[in-house]
Amino acid sequence: MILLSHAPTTEWDYLLKAAMGDGGMDRRRVWAARYQSDPAYRLYGMRDAIRVIGLLGVHYPIAGPLEITHVAVHERLRHRHLGVQMIGIVALMYRDRHFIAYTDDDAVGFYRKMGFQIESLGEVYPDRVRYRCVHEAFKTD
């Protein structure tokens, strides 16, 4: 996995769009700028031989849980556990930290399968239920 700190490329903009849904280009630009300029936010990429095929955005606050801000895998490569692998790599680097993610119905099953505890936040946006997903520090035994 590599740290994507350079200017956005078409391939990771495509994946960021997949992670955010149809949030619009302005929202993606805000997040891209945050990943480039704020050291508390990092965007990791998983590559195959020629391109970025997955990305994982993480917020690293000074204290408290690490927040998974974005996770996406190229649509042709989904359901191959690449998202799980990316989270696992970051979890190995920060074994003592909890993880938190906020998501909706589209991805809550992904976090549930990984062992995250799920809490419904209700309908935060019109017709869109949001969930808070928390995982205690990952064990590496």
Image: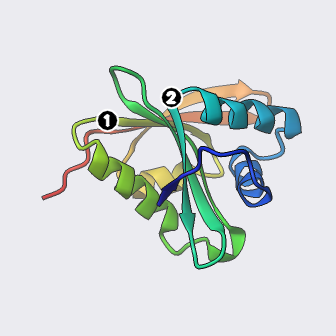
According to the picture, the residue beneath numbered tag 2 turns out to be: 39
How many residues crowd mark 1 within 10 Å: few (<14), some (14–19), many (20+)? some
Relative to 52, is 13 above or below? above
- Which residue in the rendered view is the most extreme toward the bottom? 49
The residue that mark 1 highlights is 98
Q: Which is more N-terminal, label 1 or label 2?
A: 2
Residue at 84% in and 45% down: 22
Amino acid identity at mark 1: His
Q: Is residue 129 above or below residue 79?
A: above
Quadrant assignment, res 70: top right
| Picture coordinates of residue 40, whole percent (x, y) | 49, 27
Seen from the viewer's position, the closer of residues 23 and 51 is 51
Viewer-nearest of labels 2 and 1? 2
Disc 2 is placed on an element classified as: loop
* Residue drawn at the location 36% of the way across and 56% of the way down: 89
Q: Amino acid at mark 2?
A: Pro
**Residue placed most toward the observer, 126 or 12:** 12
Q: Position of residue 59 (x, y in %)?
A: 49, 32
